[in-house]
Amino acid sequence: MTSAETHPGASSDALGPFTAHRRLLFDVAYRMLGSVVDAEDVLQDAWLSWDRADRAAVRNPRAYLVRTVTNLSLNRLTSARATRETYIGPWLPEPLLTEPLPTVRDGAEEVEMAETVSTAMLVVLESLSPPERAVFVLREVFGYSYAEIAEVLGRAEASVRQTGHRARAHVRARRPRFATEPEQRGEVTRRFLAACAGGDLNAVMELLAPEVTAWSDGGGKVTAARRPLYGADHVARWLLGMLAKPSLQAVTLESARVNGEESVVFVYGGAACAALTYDLDAVDGRVVNLRLQVNPEKLAGLAGWGAEGPTSGASGM
């Protein structure tokens, strides 16, 4: 959090512009890093930079702040890539409770924006180089021109344009098309919750594509599968076996909007302790990819979940 409460000595001329653009800044940092904790750290560093800046010389506070956040994210992403090479088990992005944007013009635009923050998209973005990721996020998600991005990154426009074309082709080649209709996801989620609550193996398998793949991220902090799991029977038995453990008897599964799409959260004592996101086949609507985040150090984006659902801390898209 960056606010007058956390910075009691902050001047209003510094706090006002930063607060006005905070959601945009977080959205840029989160898409750059796939981490809620790192995105918040970047915003904290950006605030310190902004508070110390000669603001009288800044003609466009929004552009200055986006440039600062982008470059701080680039620095953090470069160092994070080395850390992830030694990560224990599969690495997954940190889940984020989201809510519909109040500014979208129609349902199609909301779906498009939701796709840019989906777990599937964040996984694909991990395969880009840091500069490619920065250009793709600013260009394809937030609509910046190549000239504006060149100014942000301090690079020649021709070089940025080439990087953008390369990043877009990379994402297009690695991003399968999934079903994204909210009604369809809602129906799958309801059936999944009922099947898990009843321990119904056949019902769970009916929801999974034969070639389904499941990843679980425990980061070595909690028990999780160290390798991806393949096949409907294997994945269904793994899910139900996990839920049948005595340590999880007090855990309930509830629907939630995570990373822009209806998903499932595991709830213990009124707080979310894990998130399950998934991709649906565009043809038959069955689950083709399933990702379970259980690393306790990567659940900051679920903060605010209460017994009646997300109450605070949710972000826009």
Image (spheres, rainbow, N blue to C red):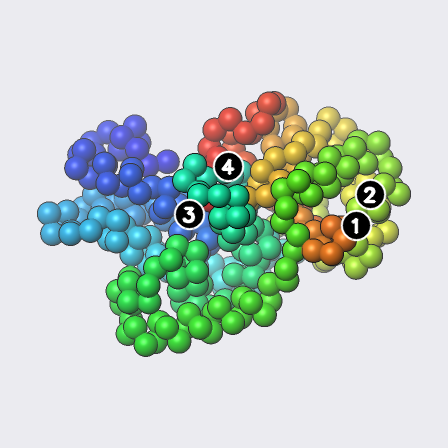
- What is the CA distance from the residue labelled 3 to the residue labelled 2? 34 Å
Which secondary structure lies at badge 2? helix
- Up the image or down, 45 lies above or below 155; here it is above
- Up the image or down, 314 lies above or below 134; here it is above
Q: Residue at x 24, y 29 (%)?
A: 8
Q: Amino acid at mark 2?
A: Val
39 with respect to 258 (left or right)? left
Pointer 3 local density, CA inside 10 Å: few below 14, some 14–19, many at least 20: some
Q: Residue at x 58, y 27 (%)?
A: 309
Q: Earlier in the sequence, mark 3 or mark 1?
A: 3
Q: Is residue 238 visible?
A: no
- What is the CA distance from the residue labelled 4 to the residue labelled 1? 27 Å
- What is the CA distance from the residue labelled 3 to the residue labelled 1? 31 Å
Q: Amino acid at mark 3?
A: Asp
8 with respect to 102 (left or right)? left
On residue 27, which mark appears? 3
Q: Dots 4 and 2: beta carbons under 8 Å? A: no
Name the residue tied to disc 1: 208
Q: Dots 3 and 2: beta carbons under 8 Å? A: no
- Up the image or down, 18 lies above or below 153; here it is above
- What is the CA distance from the residue labelled 4 to the residue labelled 2? 27 Å
Of circles 3 and 4, the one toward us is 4
Name the residue tied to disc 2: 204
Which secondary structure lies at badge 3? helix
Pointer 2 local density, CA inside 10 Å: few below 14, some 14–19, many at least 20: many
Q: Earlier in the sequence, mark 3 or mark 2?
A: 3
Q: Where does the image place residue 303, in percent across and percent down from the top left? A: 52, 33
Name the residue tied to disc 4: 99
**Quadrant assignment for the N terminus:** top left
On residue 229, which mark appears? none
Q: Dots 1 and 2: beta carbons under 8 Å? A: yes
